[in-house]
Image (cartoon, rainbow, N blue to C red):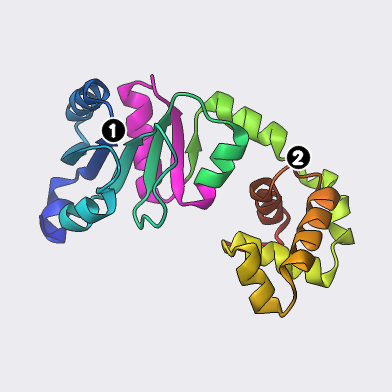
Amino acid sequence: MKVAERNRAGAIRVLLASGSAARRAGLESLISRVRKLKLVASLEGTRTIAQRAEEVEPDVIIVDVESDIPAGLEWPVVALVEEATPEWTAGALRAGVKAVLARDSGAEEIAAAVNAAYAGFVLLDPQLGFELAEKIRAPEQFDSAEELTARETEVLRLLGEGYSNREIAERLGISEHTVKFHISSILGKLGAESRTEAVSLGIRMGIIVV
């Protein structure tokens, strides 16, 4: 469908991916009942999701998640999950996911998530959003961020860009051992439990710009 035709139709084009035939059929039926959504492809699993998306040009991808979201997708993603931790959600958002909902969400919730993703907004399941807010502390609690050295700030920003320890070492001209030392120090100063959480905190504090 050409862009002009898509605009006249007024429907958001959706590509669906689920590893469960039963779940896929249920979601296909649900999407068909929402007037503003148009299902353009339905996939078994996510193995060929990028290739199929290139072919059908969806506006939004809905992924019924049984594992990690495929990396490198250029389309906004709505993830339907059985259970997501704040850490998993933070990583998913960093990977470009725009909405995370419970798997048992209804048609209205999924339609709202698709609309939000299409508009460039982020939408989370209410309980998950609350847990993530609790995990990522309020800005006034980030005084320790001032303790980051210039080098630690560089390392944190490179972590935010997805570089590995080896790649960070090469870019900064230091050893991998030194990179690990800096990361350990960053986690301690920010009170983070993982690299993903440190990156999330860095974004909240404005150290990392996305």
Q: Earlier in the sequence, mark 2 or mark 1?
A: 1
Q: Is residue 181 above or below residue 136?
A: below
Q: Residue visible at 66% across and 55% down? A: 203
Give the residue type that dot 1 points to.
Answer: Ser
Q: Which residue is mark 1?
A: 18
Q: Is residue 53 left or right of residue 63?
A: left
Distance in Å between CA atoms under marks 2 and 1: 34 Å
Q: Is residue 160 left or right of residue 172?
A: left
Q: How many marks?
A: 2
- Return the mark for residue 185: none
Based on the picture, tell me whether residue 100 belongs to the magenta stretch.
yes
* Magenta range: 93-121
Indicate the quadrant containing the C terminus: top left, top right, bottom left or bottom right: bottom right
Residue 126 drawn at (x, y percent): 54, 26
Q: Residue visible at 20% across and 51% down? A: 52
Q: Which residue is mark 2?
A: 137
Q: Is residue 178 left or right of residue 67?
A: right
Q: Please identify the quarter of the rendering in which residue 85 is found.
A: top right
